[in-house]
């Protein structure tokens, strides 16, 4: 009886080991497939939906940990959920990319106008400052302090314009227009302080 029980336990253990061994290859394949699918979308996901990518990476790491512990069943059970998460990530990244490209295209159109207008505004302010600096009597409503501030602001405007041009040159028109809008606002304030007609 004792021998029979030992034999039975050994047989069950053998079946269990065989079962685990049978699950190891599919679990390994499931992990490899998930890693491959994630690798294809990783760059765009990192750029457009980094938080979602981090969540999917955590899921993947969980299955890797289960695999390392020999819990192949957990890997096979969790693999479909991970696959769905990767597909969702891919769709989210594609949608964000499309949204970003549309915003950039819109900003590019606005940039064409800004790149024509703003340098003229800055040059006009610079000329006005040069003229007022030489004048003995400032126009009514214009203070020496306003002229001094405008003089120092011109360099700041030119510096920011260089940054805007640099962003546009690299194709990032959204950032370029962000700089351009700030420049326009500052330039208009200066022009008002110098009693110029603002654009």
Image: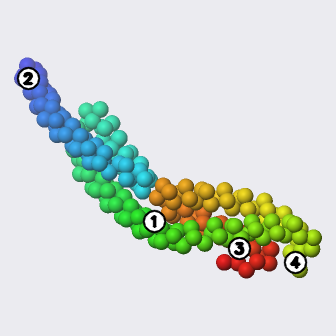
Which residue has dot 1 on it?
104
Cβ atoms at labels 4 and 1 below 8 Å apart: no
Instruction: Work out whether residue 129 or residue 167 is closer to the camera in this orientation and state it.
Output: 129
Instruction: Work out whether residue 30 or residue 174 is closer to the camera in this orientation and state it.
Output: 174
In three-dimensional space, the C-alpha distance between marks 4 and 3, rounded to whole angstroms, equals: 18 Å
Q: Which mark is residue 26?
A: none
Which residue has dot 4 on it?
139
Give neighbour class at mark 4: few <14, some 14-19, many 20+ (Cα, 10 Å): few
Is any atom of residue 129 visible in this view?
yes
- Number of the front mark, 4 or 3: 4
Which residue has dot 2 on it?
7
Q: In the picture, residue 181 is in which quadrant?
A: bottom right
54 versus 24 height, above or below: below
Placement of the N terminus among the 4 image quadrants:
top left
Cβ atoms at labels 4 and 3 below 8 Å apart: no
In three-dimensional space, the C-alpha distance between marks 1 and 2, rounded to whole angstroms, equals: 72 Å
Helix, strand or loop under label 4: loop
In three-dimensional space, the C-alpha distance between marks 1 and 3, rounded to whole angstroms, equals: 25 Å
- Number of the front mark, 2 or 3: 3
- Number of the front mark, 1 or 2: 1
Which residue lies at the image location 63% right of the left edge and 67% below the top edge? 119
């Amino acid at each position: 009886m004792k021998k029979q029980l030992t034999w039975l336990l050994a047989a069950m253990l053998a079946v269990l080991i065989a079962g685990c061994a049978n699950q190891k290859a599919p679990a390994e394949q499931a992990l490899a497939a998930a890693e491959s699918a994630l690798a294809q979308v990783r760059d765009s996901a990192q750029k457009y939906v980094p938080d979602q990518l981090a969540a999917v990476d955590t899921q993947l790491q969980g299955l890797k940990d289960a695999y390392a512990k020999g819990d192949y069943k957990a890997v096979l059970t969790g693999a479909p959920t991970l696959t769905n998460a990767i597909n969702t990530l891919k769709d989210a990244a594609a949608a964000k990319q499309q949204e970003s490209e549309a915003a950039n295209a819109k900003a590019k159109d606005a940039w064409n106008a800004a790149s024509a207008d703003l340098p003229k505004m800055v040059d006009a302010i610079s000329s006005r400052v040069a003229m007022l600096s030489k004048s003995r009597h400032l126009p009514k409503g214009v203070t020496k302090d306003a002229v001094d501030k405008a003089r120092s602001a011109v360099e700041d405007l030119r510096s920011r314009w260089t940054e805007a041009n640099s962003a546009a040159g690299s194709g990032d028109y959204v950032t370029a227009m962000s700089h351009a809008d700030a420049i326009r606002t500052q330039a208009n304030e200066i022009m008002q302080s110098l009693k110029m007609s603002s654009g």
